[in-house]
Structure formats: structure tokens, C-alpha cells
Image (tube, rainbow, N blue to C red):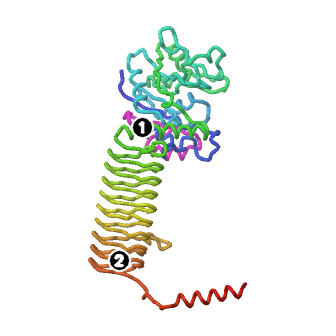
Amino acid sequence: MSQKLACIILAAGKGNRMKSALPKPLHPVAGLPMVSHVVRAAEALTPEKIIVVIGNDGQQVADTVKPHTTAMQTVPNGTGGAALAAKDALAGFDGDILVIFGDTPMITPASLQKMVDARRQLPAIGAVFSGIRPKDPAAYGRMMLDDDGTLKKIVEFKDATAEEKKITLCNGGVVCADGAKLFDWLAQIGNDNAQGEYYLTDLPQIARKDNRQTLVVELPEEDVAGVNDRVELAHMERAMQQRLRKQHMLNGVTLVDPETVYFSADTIVGQDTTIEPNVWFGTGVTLADNVTVKSSSYIEGADIAAGASIGPFARIRSGTRLGPDTLVGHFVEIKNTHMAKGAKAKHLSYLGDGDVGENVNIGAGTIFCNYDGYFKHKTKIGNGATIGANTALIAPVTIGAGAYIGAGSAIYQDVKDNALALTRAPQLQKEGWAVEFRRKKMKEKAEKK
């Protein structure tokens, strides 16, 4: 039996119930488009090909799934028609073919592998369908088994009788079939049903005519759950976050209040890292071991080294790299900036497009003035420099190693190593001025009355 594998991902549906200009498969769950979750799960099985079936207006989907091949379902005529659209892209392929839905972001490589393994048990097994036993069968198709446990047929809910609707084993959607036969079988599917569509669920009866059995592999309901509207999208996000939180905690991450922490699907977190409540991770974040993220912080597109401490109320934006043992405190925003080992910015600052050396101390209220209205410019600070509070560093500018910048300065020229630089108007003091000022104002106030 061939050990080759290909995957067809069905992503041509318009998703009218989403009421959105964005194609349904591109709506994000845990920061990634739903179809990207499915592609990642399929890639984990290292198939020879992944074909994503798109609709006539599916260019955005095609761009998202690159470099994988796409096939066009020109007429929206059901799941069977969608799978058949991949025929030319898989011409001559005789391995196993997995058919997966592009709006099922919770599907796991383990579940997909389970389907493939079942198909490869015996040559007599022509196809394997995923089955689920949901708490609420609702509108799922019902799976009818023969006495030998093989799948006799699947009845779509809209076509099911009252007796058939009592069946608790329901269709999970994922199919693994013999690639040498699949497209011949798909071509035989008819549309004599309530929807007038070509259903993948007709395959068991067609395979049986070819003396091939169809098995059912039961999967967790959440693995094959799909999304049809914004309510289901919200439920999916909640389920995905629960899964991600559990994974991180089992991998050695402390979540002080798990329900308030939101991960992206690609967030990487090292062991013995502690994440406090109300923290949000955008895409592209890697945290090493022993990092502390304090409450109400936001991090995206950043690489955080071991021992770093972030927050509370910090915002770490794309392109930021925080070195070992760095400290980023409350109400500090950092964008596209590298902070080397031991650097600190603990209060009320904005660091944009910078390169901060080791053990630099950045005082409260410091601003990297990086934008001139047309271009972004870089601020460079050498090792061991000290930036006084309420300082504006007007880029492009370089502060030398060991230099001191006086508080309240606006620095627009380079500062040499170990120099003191400050811009400050002379302090003027008038003795007794306040007494005369108060007397004058009290008189004015009395005259107004």
C-alpha cells in the first residue's frame, strides 16, 4: 500500500453568515487565519502536496496559503464538487488523500495522522471518515454503521428521518481516501438531496459498489468544529485559547490567572516564565526562560531573552528585541528597538527605532523622536550610558558609551563617550515674588466681587 500523502483543504465557501467582506477562511483565531491553522496541521504530516480549493473570489485565500497550490471551484455546488476541483492538481497521484475543511482551525496533526493510519490498515479500506459524538448533535449529519462496524452511509441532517436523527454518531467532516480511486468516486456523486448539492458524505455508498469498505475514526468534537458565523467564531477563539493556555502551563509556564491571558497560535514561551493577568500576545512573539510579564501588558512581533521583566502596562511592538535581564517598566512603549543585556527603561517612555547598549539606564519620560514626518531615524546609545528623566533624543543621534544626559534635555547632536550633555535654560529666581503675586491676585479677586 502506498505511503504517499496529499491534502485537499476546502476553502471555497463564501461564508455569507459571517456578513463580512473578508473570506470566511481568513477570519483569525488566535491571531492566525483559520485556514492557516489547517495548513499548519497538514504540513506537520509532510505530505507531498497540499491543494487549497478556493472560490472565484478567493485570491486573498490563495495569497495567504502560498506557496501551496490552489484549485478553483467555479460553481459552489457542495463539498463533493469542491474536492473534485482538486483533480487536475493531483493527476496521477495514487497515495492517500486527506480532505480537510478550511474553517476548522482546531484540527490537530495527531487527529489527521490517526485518519491516515486507519486508512492504511488494510487494502480493503477505501476511505475513512471522522466521527464525533457531540453533546448536542444539532444539525450534524448522522452516521449509520453496518453490523461489522463499517460505515454504511451518512445522512445529512436536512435529509434525515426522525428515527435517523436519534443516532448519536455524527459526521466530523474529515475524510482520508485512496487517492487512486477518490476522484472516480467523486465523479459519481449525485445531487438528489434537499440542498441540490454534491456531498462528500455519499462516498461510503459509492466505495461499497467498488467492494471497498469505509471506516469511522472518532475524534474529539473540538478538533473538527467549524465556524459559520461570528458567534461560532467567538466560541472557537475561546476554545483555542483554552487549548493554548493548557499547553503552555504543561510546558512549564506559570499563568497567574489563565483566563485573562491571550496567546497567538505561534507564541513561544520558555520554562519558568511567569505571566500575570490581562496580558495579550500578538503574532511573532518568542519568550525565553525565566521571563516575567507583568499585568496588563501587550507584546507582538518581539524576541524576549532570558531573565527579562516587562510591565506592568507595557507595550512591546514589532521588531523589538530585549536582551537578557532587561527591565521594561510601566507605561513604556518600545518599537523596533534592541535593548542589550541589563538595559533598563522602567517608567513612562517611548523607545522607537533604537539600539540600546548594555546596562543603559533610561530615565522616566524619555522619548526617542524617530519620525520627521517622512522617514524613521535611529537612536543609538552606547554601553553604560545614563539618560536623564524627561529627555528627548532627536534621531538620528548617537549617545556614546558611559555618557550622561542631563534631565530635561533635547539632544540632537551626537554625544561622545563618557561626556555630559544637557540642554537647559538658566534658572531664574526672584526672591519674594510669590508674596507680591498673591497680594495682587487677592486684590483683583476682591474687586470682582
136 relative to 31, above or below? above
- x and y percent of residue 366 in the render? 42, 71
Between residue 1 and residue 358, name the one nearer to us: 358
What residue is drawn where x is 37% and y is 52%? 292
What residue is drawn where x is 54% and y is 23%? 171
Quadrant of the image containing the C terminus: bottom right
Query: Residue 187: in sight, yes or no?
Result: no
The kind of residue on which mark 1 rests is Lys
Q: From the image, tell me which residue sits under label 2.
A: 405
Which mark is first along the chain, 1 or 2? 1
- Quadrant of residue 79 within the rendered picture: top right
What residue is drawn where x is 47% and y is 22%? 218
The kind of residue on which mark 2 rests is Ile
Between residue 29 and residue 431, name the one nearer to us: 431
- Residue 246's disc number: 1
Please give the range of residues in magenta: 44-71
58 relative to 384, above or below? above
- Residue 263's disc number: none
- x and y percent of residue 176 in the render? 45, 25
Calculate the distance from the C-alpha at mark 2 to the C-alpha at mark 1.
46 Å
Furthest residue in direction right, as rendered: 449
Query: Residue 263: in sight, yes or no?
Result: yes
